[in-house]
Amino acid sequence: MGDAAETKGEPMNNVKTLRAWWNDPVDYRWLVRTLEARSALRPLKILIGVAGAMIAVMGAVITGTPVGPPGSPGIYSTVGVLSGTLWALRWWLLPWPGKNESVLLMAGADVLFTLEFLQVPDRLFGAMGTVMLVVTGSYLGCFHSARILAAHSVWSLFAVTVFSVRIVTGGGDIRLAVAIALLLFVSVVSSVPALQILYWLLRNESLSDPLTGLLNRRGLEIRLPRLVDRDPAICLMTFDLDRFKTVNDTWGHRVGDTVLVRTAQRLRDAAGEQAVVARTGGEEFVVATPVPAASARAEAERLRVAVAESPATAVEITASVGVAVFDATVCPQCPRPTPDRLLHSADSAMYRAKQSGGNLVVVDVLTPPRDHTHPVPG
């Protein structure tokens, strides 16, 4: 019976994983900042520029040959060489592109690759040229979302189909055209999304706490800025379990781990889908959610009660909760706090709650009240 239930659950888990991969927006800015911090951004820019330079060289080499575009040099060869040269100069001389420019650059490269190789008289050589789409697909798979990569894959499938049909209409063997189509489908269309899923799983694994499945501190550092920039109001709560050392000393670390997993599940269920929930170390958790200042205390109290709810076992636990809240609707002219400031303020409030005996909520409102004389409710 257990084996059947486990087998039945596997497809559901697979669907859930694929849905999470599909909906992950990917933090482009974080990826670029991380590469820059690791001194990897400049070498990567050089390599991407070299790819464009090699394409320009290839365009010049095949000009006037039987496999090259018509003309000596023809307009298509000239456009290919010029595009490759400009591509190399752009990556070598200018800063790393923003998210929108990055997508446009790769989309433009996809279109140019396809149009250039459609002009090649040797239809088999032209079909094999679609392998260049793997280059742009690999870039999109690393830096952009599954949905953007899906658009690239649709274009790649279209290109593979056109080039394969072109072989048949040019008098080629239909079996050869089918073989080329299958080869290109595996290498150009299906391989890059598969690699992106693998990359996404490994990246998520590095950003997750292995015990609870919540975000770890690094994962929080990625998700929190996105939430702070997006929502007018942000409420960040730090939870520290009271007297957790006693639980480990009395019941053992195995029971302590069970308590941590239980607490993580309760916070995740109670906080809702819009919230970012993380375990930042030991017995400390962070919940960030778009809640206005007037509701911040009530939300923190609700989550504190959820953590302390009587368990099925004899091990009961409570939490000291520190809250930092910013609400731009209360003070539109106030500068938005940085994620670090929110975390620092919530930590300070949490320590005050712990010093007052624990199982308590302390709120630090970072937004001045509208009239600057009366405190914000809650």
Image (cartoon, rainbow, N blue to C red):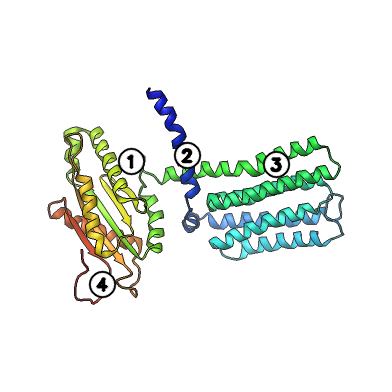
Residue labelled with disc 2: 15
Of helix, strand and loop, which one carries label 1?
loop
Q: Earlier in the sequence, mark 4 or mark 1?
A: 1
Give the alpha-carbon distance from disc 2 to disc 3, as whole Å.
Answer: 27 Å
Q: CA distance from mark 4 to mark 2?
A: 45 Å
User: Helix, strand or loop at disc 4?
Assistant: loop
Name which of mark 4 and mark 2 comes first in the sequence: 2
Residue lying farthest to the top in this orientation: 1
* Circle nearer the viewer, 4 or 2: 2
Query: CA separation, marks 2 and 1?
Result: 21 Å
- Left or right relative to 85: residue 265: left
Helix, strand or loop status at disc 2: helix
Q: Nearer the viewer, residue 356 or 54?
A: 356
Q: Provide the residue designation for mark 4.
A: 368
Q: Residue tagged by mark 3? A: 184
Disc assigned to residue 212: 1
Marked residue nearer the N-terminal end (2 or 3): 2
> Disc 2 or 1, which lies upstream in sequence?
2
Residue that lies at the very extreme toward the left in this rendered image: 357
Indicate the amino acid at tag 2: Val
Badge 2, how many Cα within 10 Å: few under 14, some, many 20+? Answer: few
* Disc 3 to disc 4, C-alpha distance: 61 Å
**Mark 4–mark 1 distance (CA, rounded to whole Å):** 36 Å
Q: Position of residue 307 (x, y in %)?
A: 22, 46
Task: For mark 3, give the secondary structure.
Answer: helix
How far apart are the two marked residues, 1 and 3, measured between alpha carbons? Answer: 42 Å
Sequence-wise, which precedes: disc 1 or disc 3? 3
Q: Earlier in the sequence, mark 3 or mark 4?
A: 3
**Quadrant of residue 173 within the rendered picture:** top right
In the picture, measured across the screen, residue 108 lies left or right of residue 96, that is right
Q: Residue at x 42, y 32 (%)?
A: 9
